[in-house]
Amino acid sequence: MSDETSSSRAADVAREHAWALTVWVAMVCWTGVLYLIVRDAYLDFRLGRFDLGNMAQSVWSTTEGRPLEITHAATGEQVLRLGAHVDPFLVLLSPVWMAWPSPLALALVQIAVTSLGALPVFWLGRRHLRSERSAGLFALAYLAYPWLATSAVGAIHPVTFAIPLFVASVWFLDTDRMGRFAVCAALAMSTGELMGLPVIGLGIWFAIARQRRRAGAAIALAGAAWTFFAVYVVVPHYAGEASTFYGFYDHVGGSPQGVVRTLLSDPTTVLGALFEMHDIVYVLWLALPLLGLFLLSPGIAAVGLPQLLANTLSDFRSMSDPRYHSVAAIVPFLVVGALWGVARLRAQRRGLAIAGVLVCSSIVALAVGPWTRALGGLPLGGRADLPESKIEALRDAVSSVPRGVPVTASNRVGAHLASRRYLYPVPIVGNARWAVIDLDDPWVTRPDSPILTQDPAKVRSFARMLEQAPGWERTYARERVLVLRRVSS
């Protein structure tokens, strides 16, 4: 081998290592900055019981020998989380809690794991773009994609972990490593009851695009079996009825079967729900940062279509907000589709396309993503910080509650009080021994709804009731934050 050939290969290896190192450094920085943003949000009471507190209580209960037990946020009963969402993935986070018993530990793991999706994006780029530089830049574009960061800082949602798992699943399918694909797909499905739908899509894509019909059919069957089992067996068993989230679809049938019946009997109702203006804007927001390049590789991009339909059919507006975690089963396939779309362009156009994606994603992310908070600003649509005096009052109120005692609390302080067995939501008393009530926090739940609603009158009424009750005494009052203690049965 000539010295010239050896030098050329050494240079190639150096370039490969340089871009791989660049991706790793970007992942670490991305994780670090987002964690600091989430940490500030937690300490400043912008992260409440929904959803960080619910997840923290589930994981804490698991470490106490009661896997996934929570206090139902609408009824105050002790239930298993599986009656609402089938996400046993949370059990895997219990060692994290045992090492660092804090909701912030869960938030950090979610951010770090989400960032790891940049690695299979890099590998896919290297394989299909035939360029270390292009692969590295597209991995950076993955991290710049605005809805990835908004999902990562939404502390926490198990389905967010599915984003890097699905990207890795595509990588292992692409390289025909079925065992590793099976592990990633199984973990992704364990994050939610609907995560079998993308697996069905991956099976269909694999059967058609790669002519692996038997393997594709087996993958699709596994995804269908998981979602059927989760939706029609697990949820009814633990909830005692069908999923409460069917209520999001009352206007189009109220259940999967109902939607099909409505589609057959009154298709205009379903089409009207799909093409409302906010749904169209939602799709545009998803597509814009990637310049719609996934349309050049529609097969893999279509794997996210079932979740997109579920989101746009819902009358719960947050599901068609790209900052909401329901994009988890869409984002991986749009990103991979955009990468493969770039690979279909002429070589001289690929660099421009990747640069366009990187620039456009960064601009959108700076406008609507969490990054603005790192610069001391407020992202579009973001919630402003509470006054410092209010934050101090909330901190004092939380610190006055003894560890582990049953408590009823406003949503705003719920995440800080989650490591206990009984965490009742205002206005439920249950067997609470303490109460922390923020009169400026109007969010409550109803027995017939899985989501929060604003009812400040109910909060004020609840506070008056406890203050007048003979068995309770007020121990703290500042900045419209009350702490009360039960002094008798």
Image: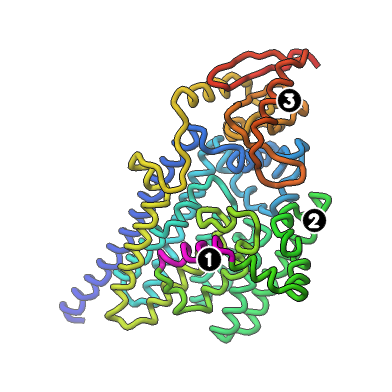
Which sits in the foreground, 27 or 65?
27
Residue 201, position as x, y percentages in the image: 61, 73
In front of the other: label 1 or label 3? 1
The image quadrant of residue 466 is top right
Q: CA distance from mark 1 to mark 3?
A: 46 Å
Instruction: Determine whether the residue tagged by mark 3 lies in a helix, strand or loop.
Output: loop
Residue 254 visible somewhere in the drawing: yes
In the picture, the disc for residue 280 is 1
> Do the CB atoms of the residues marked 1 and 3 lie less than 8 Å apart?
no
Furthest residue toward bottom:
211
Whether residue 98 appears in magenta in the rendering, the answer is no
Whichever of labels 1 and 2 marks the residue nearer the N terminus, that label is 2
| Circle 1: element type | helix
Do the numbered discs 2 and 3 sit on residues whose CB atoms are within 8 Å?
no
- Residue 261, percent across and down? 78, 71
Mark closer to the chain start, 2 or 3: 2
Give the answer, above or below, for where 471 lies relative to 430.
Answer: above
Circle 2 residue: 242
Per the image, the residue denoted by label 3 is 432
* x and y percentages locating residue 409 in the rendered image: 65, 29
The residue stretch that appears in magenta: 276-290
In the rendered image, residue 311, in percent from the top left (x then y), is placed at: 61, 61
Residue 412 disc label: none
> Could you tell me which residue is drawn at 32 percent across and 83 percent down?
346
Residue 284 within the magenta-colored segment of the rendering = yes
Q: Quadrant of the N terminus?
A: bottom left
User: Residue at the left extreme?
Assistant: 3
Foreground pick, 152 / 425: 425
Q: Quick check: 369 above or below 300?
A: above
Q: Is residue 423 visible?
A: no
Inspect the image, locate mark 1, and give the three-letter code of the amino acid beneath it.
Ile
